[in-house]
Image (cartoon, helix red, strand yellow):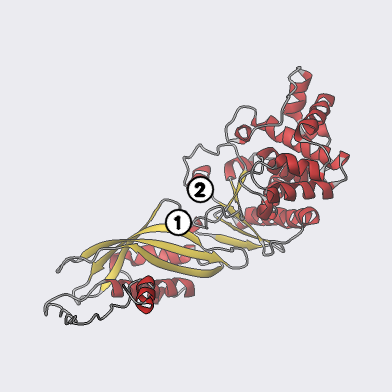
């Protein structure tokens, strides 16, 4: 039987080899005299030097880390990220096999991690394929870097930045367009904070690619997945599982088609998702999360119910009155009747505000639903509104009929 000390040593991970009576320790096996030095330390030093050069904007230092044929591409990359306010930026090799003796080229998989100053809680992670060449004097230099999977904004073009009072806008558009978007962000942030507070801290982050195809690439989805959707709110790529949304990604094609008030509503809607991210859970019904975002966006717009819900109004006039709050699937991009789903969600939240004690009651209900846990929607409704979901739905159906 092992002693208590021996058992504890084994439990600690087997890092200590016990000397049992009569046992003879084997001498360390010497490395073959002609074994090549491992390449991994040299690559680690190279990627660290490359990250320092990119952070510092040092073209000379960056050129020293890559092959002559790669200098032009790396200099262009340096220009593309020059306007990005980076708090962190670095590479980590995730998959690598030591090359055989005499090899002059090798490939490694790596992870690029970066965090934006004043906005990101977690570093964004992008997968990279790195190819290295060995020089005549035995040094290893970077030859190519290719994104695999999701991309960073600067992978698509030179990034320009515009600072607002309450937001940061990064984009591939001209400064006038970015400035207009920053003005909308500066208007949205305090309007949202009036309802939901500013517990998140930091600035609102908006990203504007140049095309709808780039919009899809930034999310690593097929090009037509979000066709016609003006903006989405998403979590930083590579963040821990279930990390709430923290940035607004604008679809330039759909955004361009909106009126000025439409653009303002879209930005405020998405800013609400960012503000409510801590209280939004997997079990929060989409009619509630999308409804509070639309309600907040339209709160001071001066628009009537008919103007806010034109598609739903037309359905009611045609005798098509819904009997249930919209399911989550009704909000999927491209779903039939998606416009009516958003309008029904807005009307439900508007009803809560008007009938149950103002915006404070809507906020309390939203937070209660998030805190209650899966399957506890009924309890949250009864606690905060004094009615169950079924009774509220009847009230809402009657409200819809008034349209």
What is the x, y in percent for residue 208? 58, 52
* Disc 1 secondary structure class: helix
Of the image marks 1 and 2, the number of the one nearer the N terminus: 1
Tell me, for residue 118, which label it has, or none. Answer: none
Q: Is residue 24 left or right of residue 56?
A: left
Which tag is nearer the camera, tag 1 or tag 2? Answer: 2
> Is residue 261 visible to the viewer in this orientation of the structure?
no
**Image quadrant for the N terminus?**
bottom left
Which label belongs to residue 219? 2
Q: Measured from the top left, where is residue 327 in percent x and y?
A: 65, 32
Label 2 residue SS:
helix
382 versus 118 height, above or below: above
Image position, residue 303 (x, y; %): 82, 38
**Mark 1 crowd level (few <14, some 14–19, many ≥20, 10 Å Cα):** some
Q: Mark 1 highlights which residue?
A: 155
Find residue 401 and report its image quarter. top right
| Frontmost residue, 18 versus 173 | 18
Q: Nearer the viewer, residue 351 or 89?
A: 351
Report the number of numbered marks.
2
Q: Quadrant of residue 143?
A: bottom left
The residue shown at (54%, 56%) is 236
Q: Residues within 10 Å of mark 2 (few under 14, many from 20)?
A: many
Residue at 47%, 59% in the rendered image: 125
């Amino acid at each position: 039987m092992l002693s208590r000390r021996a058992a504890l040593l084994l439990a600690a991970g087997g890092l200590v080899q016990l000397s049992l009576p009569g046992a003879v320790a084997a001498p360390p096996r010497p490395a073959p005299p002609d074994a090549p030095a491992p390449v991994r330390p040299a690559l680690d030093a190279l990627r660290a030097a490359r990250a320092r050069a990119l952070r510092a904007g040092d073209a000379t230092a960056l050129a020293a880390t890559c092959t002559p044929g790669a200098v032009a591409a790396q200099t262009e990359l340096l220009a593309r990220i020059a306007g990005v306010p980076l708090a962190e930026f670095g590479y980590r090799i995730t998959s690598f096999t030591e090359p055989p003796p005499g090899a002059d080229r090798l490939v490694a998989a790596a992870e690029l991690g970066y965090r934006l100053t004043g906005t990101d809680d977690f570093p964004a992670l992008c997968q990279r394929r790195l190819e290295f060449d060995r020089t005549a004097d035995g040094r290893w230099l970077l030859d190519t870097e290719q994104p695999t999977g999701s991309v960073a904004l600067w992978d698509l073009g030179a990034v320009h930045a515009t600072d607002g009072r309450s937001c940061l806008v990064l984009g591939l558009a001209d400064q006038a367009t970015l400035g207009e978007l920053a003005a909308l962000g500066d208007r949205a942030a305090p309007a949202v904070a009036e309802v939901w507070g500013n517990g998140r801290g930091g600035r609102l982050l908006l990203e504007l690619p140049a095309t709808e195809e780039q919009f899809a690439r930034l999310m690593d989805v097929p090009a037509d997945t979000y066709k016609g959707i003006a903006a989405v709110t998403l979590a930083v790529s590579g963040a821990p599982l279930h990390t709430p949304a923290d940035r607004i990604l604008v679809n330039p094609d759909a955004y361009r088609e909106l009126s000025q008030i439409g653009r303002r509503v879209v930005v405020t809607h998405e800013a609400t998702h960012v503000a409510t991210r801590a209280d939004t859970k997997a079990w929060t019904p989409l009619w509630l999360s999308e409804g509070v975002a639309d309600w907040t966006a339209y709160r001071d717009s001066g628009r009537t119910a008919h103007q806010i819900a034109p598609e739903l109004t037309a359905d009611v006039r045609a005798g098509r009155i819904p009997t249930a709050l919209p399911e989550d699937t009704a909000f999927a991009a491209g779903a039939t009747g998606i416009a009516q789903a958003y309008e029904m969600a807005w009307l439900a939240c508007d009803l809560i505000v008007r009938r149950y004690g103002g915006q404070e009651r809507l906020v309390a209900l939203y937070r209660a639903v998030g805190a209650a846990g899966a399957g506890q929607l009924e309890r949250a409704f009864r606690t905060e509104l004094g009615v169950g979901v079924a009774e509220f739905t009847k009230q809402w159906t009657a409200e819809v009929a008034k349209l």
